[in-house]
Amino acid sequence: MPPSRLNRRSFLGRGLLGVVAGLGAPAWAAEPGRARKLATGKSKPLSLDELSIAGAGRALATGAHTARSLTGHYLRRIRDLDKRGPELRAVIEINPDATALADALDAEYKAKGPRGPLHGVPVLLKDNLDTADRMSTTAGSLALAGVKRARDSRVAAKLRQAGAVLLGKANLSEWANFRSSRSSSGWSGRGGQTRNPYALDRNPSGSSSGSAVAVAANLCCVAIGTETDGSIVSPSSINGIVGIKPTVGRVSQAGIIPISHSQDTAGPMARTVRDAAILLEALVEDRLELAGVFDPHGLRGARLGVPRKFFGSHERVDRVLEDALAALKRLGAEIIDPADLPSTGQFGEAEMEVLLYEFKADLNRYLAGLDASAPVHSLKELIGYNERHRALELPYFGQELFVRAEAKGPLTSPEYLAALEKCQRLSRAQGIDAVMDKHRLDALVAPSEAPAWPIDLVGGDHSIGGGGCISPAAVAGYPHVTVPAGYVFGLPVGLSFVGRAHSEAVLIKLAYAFEQATQVRRPPRFAPTPDWAR
């Protein structure tokens, strides 16, 4: 989760890509032309840039490509843009079995045909989702480097079942950004600092930093992120991609390193709404009805509310969003403005209480299930590990949230139960449901997040403003879709669609119609700094 929401080296094994390192700009960073050359020169064939799931399916069907050649393409891009070149540090580990997986799927395709739209599609998983293979699952922490899992997370299992190639693990804000209130999003002890591909001196946001950057920079076809409060939506917005935070419970939490069982969920991150929806369909435990959602006229007659309290922090962001609202009107939507949530800003302290209590309980349960060879099996032991390895794990910021969580009691504590009730009541019945009932809305629309702020390992994250409607849906456990809406100094800004529980199909339909009409997204150029002329 991004700290802004709540105050907000190769170490082991041949697959690890990052090192704990400073942020000194590489020598080539002063040569934007070289950055563009790297982006397109070593990653041929160019026809695979911005490849969609459907495009991958067509390539396999026509024989133009195989799962192996697609996998090889992304492995080369990771080599050229992540480990070298701009050194994005988005990928923390390559799956040593990725090529073998692709070969097996090619043989199956030839013998039986495709399993579905994800057959042979290379996917990156955030490094907090268990995989029962030769990769580690570490939440970015050196404490778990090299520790293997006996079972796939439910998400990984469903991706394998769908025929996806598990390409590797994506870097993230360590422990999903729930370690310090002064952290730098995208930094982990195991992977170093992930860079924003639109401006390399800017933060990628978190905690699904690597997943977002990898998708934006075409290091994979699609990726999986996780969110507690903003960790899918914020990095998706800031890196110019589509992110879907589903209703909590629709995607299984099994085998995911946790923060909070009441707010955690995995979700898809992609370059298009269609790809994000297809990936989500493969992840959900129930049925996601996508019939009719890919309709370019899907905004006609929709009633959309504008929570104005999320505007006004940055005039350039407001300008982008006003243009987006005008586009929604032209596309046939009825805009109800304002349509503010009556409980905006009232549950921040209660949310932190819930997260601290649940983090201790949920993480202790997860760590207790690790193999006996793991160096930590509880939050208390993890705090001790970090203290003993301060130079590697605590070089820039501390673990005060760990310490606060460790001091909490059980989930039967009256303090926890009162905070949970307050959060759910204010975010649901007196929040999103209340405003949607009052105005008979199909969705709320607002700025997703501020543009990317500078990377700062000294002071930590400091959002430059611009609003952001992330927390209400996160606390309520309701769905949230972000789609590219524009740029501020060349930095992406997203438009959010928020709705009631289990309204993903409605939000996807609205977001798809907006995306098809506006076609805002453009690939990153790996510039050393923002484009101040824009």
Image (cartoon, grey):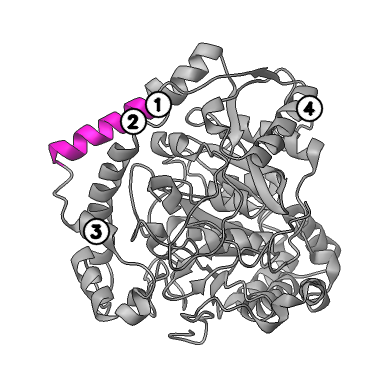
Earlier-in-chain disc, 4 versus 2: 4
Q: In which quarter of the image is residue 217?
A: bottom right
Prevailing SS of the magenta stretch: helix
Are the two marked residues, 1 and 2, in contact with CB atoms closer than 8 angstroms?
A: yes
Seen at 80% across and 24% down, the residue is 330
Question: What residue is pinned by disc 4?
Answer: 297
Q: In which quarter of the image is residue 148?
A: bottom left
Are the two marked residues, 3 and 1, in contact with CB atoms closer than 8 angstroms?
A: no
Position in image of residue 240 (x %, y %): 67, 52
Q: Residues within 10 Å of mark 4 (few under 14, many from 20)?
A: some
In the image, the segment drawn in magenta is: 412-427
224, above or below 385, in the image: above
Can residue 294 be spotted in the picture? no
Residue type of the residue flagged with mark 1: Arg
Q: Quadrant of residue 48?
A: bottom right
Question: What residue is pinned by disc 1?
Answer: 428
Q: Distance between the residues labelled 1 and 4?
A: 29 Å
Of circles 4 and 2, which is in front?
2
Question: What residue is pinned by disc 2?
Answer: 424
